[in-house]
Image (cartoon, helix red, strand yellow):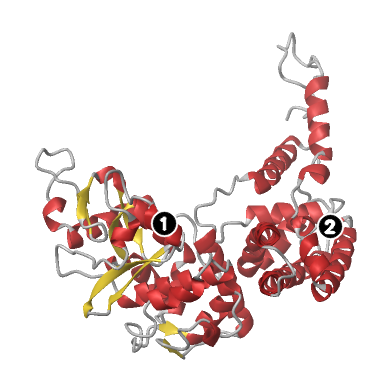
Amino acid sequence: MADDHLESGSASKGKGEVKAFDFKREEKRSNQRKAPRETVPDPLMEFSIPKTVRKASGELDEKAKRMEERKRKISAMSDEAVGSGHETPRAFVKERENFANDAAALIKASRAGVDSLVSECKMNRKDAGQAKKELEASDRMLLKERAVLATNKVRVEYGILAHPSHARLGEAYLAAVVENLQGPARAAVQEQGPWDSGDQANFRARLIKNYCPLEAQLDPNDTNFAGRWCPVTGTYHDDRHVKAAHIVPYSIGEGNAAYLFGLDPETGYEAMWSSRNGLILHEAVEEAMDTARMVIVPDPTAMSELQAAVLDPELLRIPAFLKGPTFEDLDGKRLQFRTAARPGRRYLYLNTLLTLFRRKRFCVNGWEEDMHKMRFERVWASPGPWLRRSIIKALAYEIGDAHRLDDLGPGNRGLVDFPDQKSPSREASMAIVIRRGIEVKDDNDDDDEWATTKQIIEDRREQRNLGLGGFSDDNASDGEGE
């Protein structure tokens, strides 16, 4: 094998002749070994409670001070060496997990505190809006870390141990977290990866067949092809502008969906990809539903039918599509179907609850009125045994900052205690992963806050392959006993 420190760029002039040493390349490798400490974005270090909130609330300020002391402790631990045993990485991972979850809880308390401060005229709305924006930025950064630890804590620990014994613990931890941003399919708490394009194509074809049978028989390029029918807008649209939309996002995970619905875990795929969990929708309508600005609910005047409910007042004035009706025209409009096929009520109900939780967390102006528009007092008055009560309560807290479902209006409608209930801590982990699936499902894992970390991991892999401080066998005799 050729020496890694000998550059192969110059041609060999004879057997055994030494190749020229490339100082520029070696300098680059040296910089790669030094770079991570300054460039890795760390959710822990990004976390903070806005100064305006701390200044206005002595209680939140005291809690923030305690969190800062924990940050300093963890930061000191980050400079320790990985070592060769499990004890140090395991303790560090546990410390990070506890901090991340406690930080998320403090963010929830701070959001509630901001609302109280505004209502007591101790903070103006401009400062409140900025404070919530800063809190949300910290929350989203922490959410990825919390989701990884909820699904892959042991994998993160093993990922740390794969680094050299002399490597810094904090850097090895961040690298392991990034490598596990997408959970494995068989994880105990499932984080769903990107869908298979074949599954989505089949899903779209089945939805078109169910809801647009005549159009399903025609090629979009056929002159007789009128387009795809959207039951919300009540008109045909060009094939490029309609989506095969999941009502309950696929990104929450098949296993998690099965648990939510109280189904056999093996039926998770069927639950998520059932045509009852989908509609053919114009892209603007799908986006409005994805962003918690619109829902589909039963029609109170004809319980077998459905109607659109636009929740965002600002959306009402916007045309749903070019030269088309405004969202105000769609608000309260009965959906128009071309066949007897209808989406499943349990999917619509879960979508409605999740939308309510999200709007509650952000205290969207008039969210209390959402419950009226969502028809909780009428059309959802007597739903079937649709959803698992315990996990919905966990989601209400994780997504909606609500300690009690009664605080939100729907109470326990449609919620039952299915068998095989998991522990509260496991359900809390599931709620974290489900929330990330809903709110970060469109994020690119190469976004700004993680891109440099991913590059560092690739640099380290290159170093390993080149024999420049890569993974060692320091863990070979750690007594793991696998």
Q: Quadrant of the C terminus?
A: bottom right
Residue at point 70%, 63% (across, down): 124
- Residue 320 visible in image: yes
Q: Which residue is label 2 attached to?
A: 82
Residue projecting furthest to the top: 13
Residue at point 40%, 86% (across, down): 414
- Residue 86 visible in image: no
> Which of the 4 image quadrants contains residue 104?
bottom right
Q: CA distance from mark 2 to mark 1?
A: 52 Å
Residue 200 picture location, percent across and down: 34, 54
The three-letter code of the residue at mark 1 reads Leu
- Between residue 324 and residue 192, name the one nearer to us: 324
Disc sitting over residue 315 in the figure: 1
Disc sitting over residue 323 in the figure: none
The three-letter code of the residue at mark 2 reads Val
Category of crowding for the residue at label 1, using alpha-carbon neighbours closer than 10 angstroms: few (below 14), some (14–19), many (at least 20): some
Residue 426 picture location, percent across and down: 60, 79
Closer to the N terminus: mark 2 or mark 1? 2
- Tell me if 105 is positioned left or right of 474 in this view: left
Q: Quadrant of the N terminus?
A: top right
Residue at point 82%, 68% (across, down): 64
Residue 371 picture location, percent across and down: 44, 77
- Tell me if 115 is positioned left or right of 318 in this view: right
Q: Secondary structure at mark 2?
A: loop
